[in-house]
Image (spheres, grey):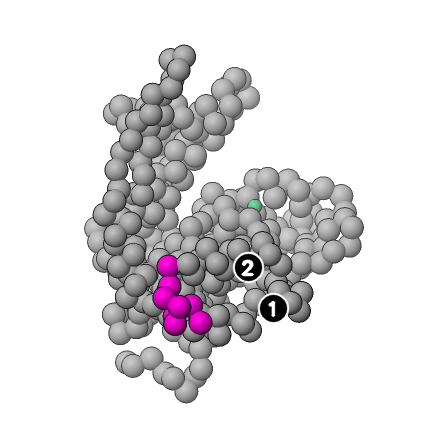
Amino acid sequence: LMDRGLVNGFGAAKIAAATSWLSDEDARAADALLEDRLEGKNSEQIRKAASHVAMTVDREGASRRSEHSRAGRRLTVRHGEAGVASIEVEDGPVEKVAAAYTRIDREARALKTGGEPRTLDQLRADVALDLLLGGQGGKSERAEVFLYMDLATYLGVNEGPAELAGHGCIPASVAREIAGGPDTVLRRIITDPLSGQVLDLGRDRYRPTAGVGEFVRVRDRECRRPGCQRPAQACDLDHVVPWQFGGHTNADELIDLCRRDHRLKDEPGWIYRLAADGTLTVTTPTGQRYDSSPPPLHEPRMAEEPPPF
Ligand SMILES: [Zn+2]
C-alpha cells in the first residue's frame, strides 16, 4: 500500500505500533484483513482499524495482555524542585481513568467563569487534588463513560473487541467484566451484531423527544471533526444548519463538536453538511472536502453468518 501511495509512513507506523505484540503468523493475518480497509483513512482511523484487527486475530492474547497491563497499576509520586511534585496513577483501568478525567475536566470548566484568573490546566490540577483530599472539587455531577459492545459479545457467545469512547478498543473479556460490574461511571451501549451500529437507541425506533441529545451523543461517540477524539459527553451539540437559518433540533441536524471545533466551524469559509445517514461532509476554506460517518463498532458482517442465538 505504501508503494502504491495509499498509506503514508505515519499511517504505517500506527499499524506497526498497534500490531507489534502479535506473532508473525497473526501479524500476517492482520495485514490481510487490513489491506482493503485503509484506503482514504486518516492516521487516527488507521490506528483504530489496526487495533481492532489485532484484537480480532488474537483475542486471547489481547485479553491476556490487557489483564497483565491492568495488574500493573500503581500510584507514583515524583518530587520536583522549587516546591512542586507530581502524582500519577499509572496503568489504571481505562474506564475509571477516563471517567475521572471527564469529572475533573467538567468541574474545572464549571469554575472557569469570567473573574477566574486560573487557567484550565491549573483548575484541573486544583480540582483533582481537592477531590483526592476529600473535597468536592467544584460543582458535583456524575461523569459517564460510554462502552460500545455488540450484543453477541455482551452475551458471551462472541469475542469481538469492544470500544470505549475517547480511548479505542478493549478486549471482550475486559468489556464484559466492566459491563457486568457494579460501576456507576459506565454507560453501556449495545450494538447490532451485523451492522455494528447502535442497537438500543436505534434510529428506526427513535422519536424526537427529550432524548435527542442523548441519541446524538451515543451515535457520534466523539467530536465529529475528522481526527478529533474528545468524548461526546464533553462536547457541544451543534445545529449543522443554524437555528436562525431554518435548522431543526432533531438527530438528522445535530452533531457533536468539541468546544474548539465548534468555534472553528463558525469561522467564515467552513461548510458542514449532514446527510440523513449521519455522514458529515466538511469543506474547508481552501475547498478540501472530508467525509466522516458515525463510527460503527466494526465493519459490517456477512448476513449469512447469523449470530448463534
Ligand atoms: Zn473536536
**Cα–Cα span, label 2 and label 1:** 9 Å
Residue 278 x, y percent position in the rendering: 57, 63
Magenta residue check for 26: yes
Q: Quadrant of the N terminus?
A: bottom right
**Quadrant of residue 189 in the image?**
bottom left
Extreme residue in the left direction? 182
Q: Residue at x 65, y 49 (%)?
A: 243
Mark 1 Cβ and ligand 1 under 8 Å apart:
no
Q: Residue at x 72, y 42 (%)?
A: 267
State the residue position of label 1.
1
Amino acid type indicated by mark 2: Ala
Q: Which sits in the foreground, 151 or 47?
A: 47
Residue 188 x, y percent position in the rendering: 33, 57
Q: Secondary structure at mark 1?
A: loop
> Does label 2 or label 1 sit earlier along the sequence?
1
Mark 2 Cβ and ligand 1 under 8 Å apart:
no
Q: Residue at x 64, y 40 (%)?
A: 263
Left or right of residue 175, residue 289 in this image: right
Q: Is residue 173 above or below residue 84?
A: below
Magenta residue check for 123: no
Left or right of residue 197, residue 78 in this image: left
Magenta part of the protein: which range?
A: 21-28
Q: Residue at x 24, y 57 (%)?
A: 177
Q: Pointer 1: residues within 10 angstroms few (<14), some, or many (20+)? A: few
Q: Give the numbered dot on residue 12.
A: 2
Q: Do the numbered discs 2 and 1 sit on residues whose CB atoms are within 8 Å? A: yes
Q: Quadrant of the C terminus?
A: bottom left
Q: Which sits in the foreground, 173 or 295?
A: 173
Tell me if I can see residue 11 in this picture: yes
**Quadrant of residue 281 in the image?**
bottom right
Left or right of residue 225, residue 179 in this image: left
